[in-house]
Image (cartoon, rainbow, N blue to C red):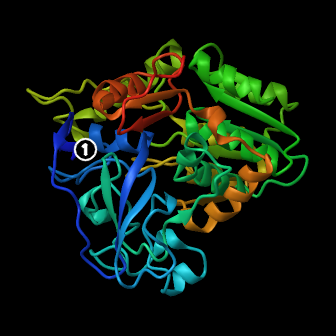
């Protein structure tokens, strides 16, 4: 079967690989109908999240049809159409039972303190082969996959696997109260859903910050007040929009390098700082013989978040970070801020989000801008990384499909 495979930093390929087989009684084999490209995938490819093993299949977003089940899977039947949560959890430990599926004690074979287990990640996360493939083995299938109703089509369903639950958790962690003013930094797919989810939590005003025109326009179409940080100082603009007070809540939907600035003073400053650290972060980010040329440098959103939020406010960090050299903890303490963060507990939110999609409260397909055949996965990754105009969320399909208009 075909799959998108990691061969080294800056080097991914569409390979022929062996089909997965049942290993444990709680496994299922899913024939994938669709996967997707996520900013987190870029972290592994660029080396800003380290520890990827050569030969690992990428991708942690997927929907498909159950093909085979282990003898301990009693809630699914071959032929069921399911959405697969990006994180893997056993369902039995105290963390899973409390809804903290990302902190499962049993799913990660590296041990209970090793961190979140998820598909297509580094050695520290399992590793588990990912979902950018024609078929996948799903561990703990008696807990993870959720059956999809017929009313939810594939375009909507693929966004329920990761980014909509992630955004919903980001909004929930921000502790948004009705009438609050909320700033969302980073308007990639998760950021767009953070805007939508802030509306579900009855935010009074939403200020959305990015520099890519198509992203800003999508956020504006959702009713957000937009700021292009390459054209103006985002902190100054936020203070002007809030009579000098700042926002009540901030959601950082950027992470270590997912939404890099491309131009303007802020971009140049960030690029200069990134250049100093590049050798330490990913010295071989574009090795000879690789097929990847990374995009520009990361922005300094963590500092902006602390500056932008009002005293006694909340900063919710949902963008993915590895190690960072500094964080303005003194400023955060001086302002009595609440900081929340963490990997998404996908399985906790997916059933509720399915209900919201069925009721018409949210239509996740509005964020999907491209459908690409898996055979075009490498080119699609490059376009997504370069922030090509209109490329907000990319769905990969095993069968060739016509791309949506940008």
Q: Residue at x 66, y 33 (%)?
A: 366
Residue 149 horizontal side relative to residue 356, left or right: left
Q: Which x, y percent locates residue 353?
A: 68, 57
Q: Is residue 152 above or below residue 68?
A: above
Q: Residue furthest left?
A: 288
Which residue corresponds to mark 1?
3
On the rendered structure, is 71 left or right of 79? left
Taking the spot 62% from the left edge, 61% from the top edge, the residue there is 350
Count the marks: 1
Name the foreground residue: 308 vs 40.
Answer: 40
> Could you tell me if residue 11 is visible in this image?
yes
The correct choice, above or below, for 302 with respect to 389 in the image is below
Question: Residue 389: x percent and y percent?
Answer: 51, 16
Residue situated in front as seen by the camera: 126 or 153: 153
Does residue 306 appear in the picture of this structure?
no
Residue at 74% in and 44% down: 362
Q: Residues within 10 Å of mark 1 (few under 14, many from 20)?
A: many
- On the rendered image, what quadrant is the C terminus found in? top right
Q: Is 310 on the left-hand or right-hand side of 251?
A: right
Horizontal and vertical percent position of residue 155: 57, 40
Q: Nearer the viewer, residue 307 or 248?
A: 248
The answer to which quarter of the image holds residue 118 is bottom left
Q: Secondary structure at mark 1?
A: strand
Q: Report x, y in % for residue 283.
A: 18, 36
For residue 102, side relative to residue 363 (left or right): left
């Amino acid at each position: 079967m075909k799959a998108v495979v990691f061969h080294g930093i800056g080097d991914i390929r569409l390979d022929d690989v062996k089909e997965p087989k049942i290993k444990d009684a709680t496994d299922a084999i899913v024939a994938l109908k669709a996967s997707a490209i996520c900013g987190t995938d870029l972290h592994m490819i660029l080396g800003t999240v380290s520890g990827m093993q050569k030969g690992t299949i990428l991708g942690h977003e997927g929907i498909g049809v159950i093909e085979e089940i282990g003898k301990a899977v009693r809630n699914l039947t071959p032929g069921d159409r399911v959405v697969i949560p990006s994180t893997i959890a056993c369902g039995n430990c105290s963390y899973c039972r409390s809804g903290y599926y990302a902190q499962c004690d049993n799913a990660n074979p590296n041990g209970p303190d090793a961190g979140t287990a998820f598909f297509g990640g580094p050695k520290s996360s399992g590793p588990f082969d990912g979902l950018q493939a024609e078929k996948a083995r799903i561990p703990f299938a008696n807990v993870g996959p959720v059956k999809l109703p017929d009313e939810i089509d594939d375009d909507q369903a693929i966004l329920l696997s990761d980014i909509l639950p992630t955004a919903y958790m980001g909004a929930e962690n921000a502790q948004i109260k009705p009438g609050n003013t909320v700033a969302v930094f980073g308007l990639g797919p998760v950021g767009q859903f953070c805007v939508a989810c802030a509306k579900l939590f009855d935010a009074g005003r939403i200020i959305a910050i990015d520099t890519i025109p198509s992203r800003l326009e999508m956020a504006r179409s959702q009713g957000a007040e937009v700021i292009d940080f390459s054209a103006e100082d985002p902190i100054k603009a936020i203070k002007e929009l809030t009579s000098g007070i700042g926002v009540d809540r901030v959601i950082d939907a950027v992470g270590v390098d997912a939404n890099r600035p491309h131009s303007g003073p802020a971009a140049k400053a960030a690029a200069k700082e990134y250049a100093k650290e590049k050798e330490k972060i990913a010295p071989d980010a574009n090795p000879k013989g690789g097929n990847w040329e990374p995009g520009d440098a990361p922005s300094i959103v963590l500092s902006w978040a602390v500056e932008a939020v009002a005293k006694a406010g909340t900063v919710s960090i949902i963008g993915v970070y590895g190690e960072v050299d500094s964080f303005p903890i003194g400023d955060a303490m001086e302002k009595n801020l609440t900081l929340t963060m963490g990997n998404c507990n996908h399985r906790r939110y997916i059933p509720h989000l399915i209900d919201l999609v069925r009721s018409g409260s949210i239509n996740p397909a509005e964020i999907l801008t491209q459908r690409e055949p898996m055979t075009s996965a490498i080119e699609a990754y490059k376009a997504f990384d370069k922030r090509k105009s209109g490329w907000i969320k990319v769905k990969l399909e095993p069968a060739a499909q016509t791309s949506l208009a940008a």
